[in-house]
Image (tube, rainbow, N blue to C red):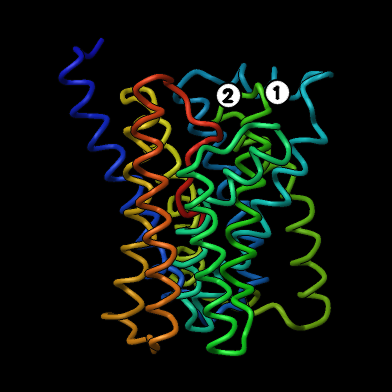
Amino acid sequence: MESGKEGSGAGVAYALGAYTLWGITPIYWKLTNWVPADELLAPRVLWTALLMLGVLAVARRSGELRWALAPGQGLWTSLAAALLLGFNWLIFIYAVQTERLIHASLGYYINPLVSVVLGLVVLRERLTRLQGLAVGMAVLGVIWLVVETGVLPWISLLLAVSFALYGLIHKLSPKPPRAGLALEMWLLTPLAIGYWLWLALQGKAVLVEEPAAGQLLIAVSALVSAAPLLCFHAATRRLPLVSVGMFQYLAPTVTLLLALFLYAEPFQPAHLAAFAFVWAGLVCFAVDALRTGQRQRDPALPLGGESG
């Protein structure tokens, strides 16, 4: 058993690891961009499903998966979560492949604010003044971007909304996180394999003739998917959730830095203004979370990072 100080130190390390890994995942997806995003999703789901079975077996938590499959444990809810996560993964990979990492970063900055709105609408929670101000600033940022560029940042919005809905389902679900993720992957697996077989029959599957080295690189997607989530869950066991929440802005920041300095994506004045609005809102959100954390251990919704 870890002491309080050692546990906190390990918790910080796990939190840094989780959000840094989420932030740098675009590097991996760039390496695999010869495979279309929709086809890439199929092996990612399958390999992650197999990896999570191994994780549960090593942790001696296989019983959690059997419990999650028992009648009355919300199998349809898990399927909805699985579809949302798969959709989120698809959009993120597409954003990487089409050089729209800036939009992906914006989406994950907005994500916690969308979660606040879901808490208001679905859970009937009350918005504090600072939360209301934070949401308002984010909305202004998106409106500014639309007006200045004439283009709706649909990638940002879809990433933010899909992952916020995924978080909401997990907030309402009693399933342990590891078993929940394993179940979601196995629910997606038949759909993923079926879609890939359809691509193969149409002669559109790139992976059919891929050599062993390429197949191995694709298999690594399981680690890319599961490692940050496992680090995140390890962090939440060792740190107050409000503390873990302060790390969640690291992932989109790392992604944004990659977009600007490694991949040289164009960053227009309209983007800077939109990000400035969102960052101002996040400062309000963070201050409110710190205040709330002094009175209440758990935030309204599970903390997010990048799911990509």
* Outermost residue to the front: 129
Residue 254 pos. (x, y %): 31, 63
Residue to which mark 1 is pinned: 68
**Of the numbered discs in the image, which one, if any, rests on residue 293?**
none
Q: Quadrant of the N terminus?
A: top left
Along the viewing direction, whichever of 222 and 165 lies nearer the viewer: 165
Viewer-nearest residue: 104 or 193: 104
Q: Say which residue appears at 47% left-offset and 72% top-offset.
A: 214
Which residue position is annotated with label 2?
176
Query: Where 130 sits versus 59, above or below?
Result: below
> Quadrant of residue 127 in the image?
top right
Q: SS class of the residue under badge 1?
A: helix
* Mark 1 residue type: Ala
Q: Identify which residue is drawn at 70% across, 77% down.
A: 205
Residue 163: image location, x then y, percent: 60, 51
Which is nearer the eye, 192 or 78?
A: 78
The quarter of the picture where residue 193 lies is bottom right
Instruction: Name the residue located 63 percent from the left edge and 79 percent from the top edge.
Output: 152
In primary-sequence order, the first of circles 2 and 1 is 1
Nearer the observer, 144 or 24 = 144
Residue 5 lies, with reference to residue 29, above or below; the image says above
Query: Which residue type does callout 2 highlight?
Result: Pro
Q: Residue at x 84, y 19 (%)?
A: 71
**126 left or right, relative to 289:** right
Bin the neighbour count of mark 1 within 10 Å (Cα to Cα): few under 14, some 14-19, many 20 and up: many
Tell me if 167 is positioned left or right of 215 in this view.
right
The answer to the question of whether label 2 and label 1 lie on touching residues, with beta carbons closer than 8 A, is yes
Q: Report the side of 278 relative to 115 (left or right).
A: left
| Separation (CA) of disc 2 from disc 1 | 8 Å
Q: Is residue 133 above or below residue 14?
A: below
> How many C-alpha atoms fall within 10 Å of the one at disc 2: few (<14), some, or many (≥20)?
some
